[in-house]
Amino acid sequence: MSDTPDRVPTPCPSCSPDLETVHEVLTAGGGTLTVRCSECSHVHKIQPDTEREVTLDVVVSQGGESFTANVTAPEDETVEVGDEFILETEEVLSTVRVTSVELDGQKRVDEAPVDEIETVWTREVDNVAVNVTVHPQDGSRDDSHSITVHVPGDYEFEVGAVESFGDDEFEIDAFVVRDDASGYRRDRFEEPGDTAFAKDIKRVYAYDEQSSAWSAW
């Protein structure tokens, strides 16, 4: 079935150059339509309207810093928290995830049509920094410390797995996923075998494997 309409509104160069009139579509091809004005029967060619696009301001959080860029999106699209898209500028090519949508008056919402959006707030998810709270094996929280590990966004963490990053080695006890992560049935996971991608994780809780080795001495 053809997507070409039978009639289209368009100005007629013969009888109505400034106002649209109804035209009958005669043929379509080569990116143009041959149409006949219903008012004066003048036949001419037109280019059908292409989908209108809106330019959006995008703020990208990347490794503790942020920068601003622009993207275009179809006018009838909706942007919502959790959406991911590829951002391409002269400086960067990366995948980003929407963390907040800002409307006029600095109002923040979870989703909105693109023509109502002032700013889209995002973070890079190709490569991410994951915060890890590491507890000693004896369970003492006084000697706990935090580290930050840098991994690809699709790196998978699993409860019960032992991870090594430089001088740090720890066994994952639990993790909490971010508010913008989708597809998870809850926000905290602590059952052995539970997994999540690094780009979805807000914080990992773990026990220090090195303190276990030291205790043997």
Image: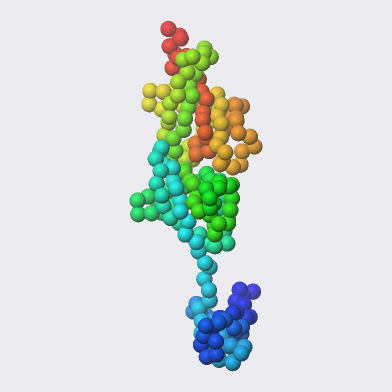
Residue 197 position, x and y percent, is 52, 37
In the depicted structure, whether residue 33 falls above or below residue 84: below
Of residue 161 and residue 111, the one placed in the foreground of this image is: 111
Residue 104 position, x and y percent, is 53, 53
Residue 25 visible, this orientation: no
Please name the residue shown 41% across and 37% down the image: 64
Quarter in which the C terminus is drawn: top left
Residue 36 visible, this orientation: yes
Of residue 157 and residue 123, the one placed in the foreground of this image is: 123
Quarter in which the N terminus is drawn: bottom right
The quadrant holding residue 165 is: top left
The quadrant holding residue 168 is: top left
In the depicted structure, whether residue 128 falls above or below residue 81: above
In the depicted structure, whether residue 200 falls above or below residue 133: below
In the depicted structure, whether residue 193 falls above or below residue 96: above
Residue sticking out furthest to the top: 217
Residue 6 position, x and y percent, is 63, 80
Mark count? 0
Of residue 92 and residue 215, the one placed in the foreground of this image is: 92
Residue 37 position, x and y percent, is 58, 88
Of residue 159 and residue 33, the one placed in the foreground of this image is: 33
Please name the residue shown 58% across and 53% down the image: 112
Please name the residue shown 46% across and 9% down the image: 215
Please name the residue shown 43% across and 11% down the image: 214
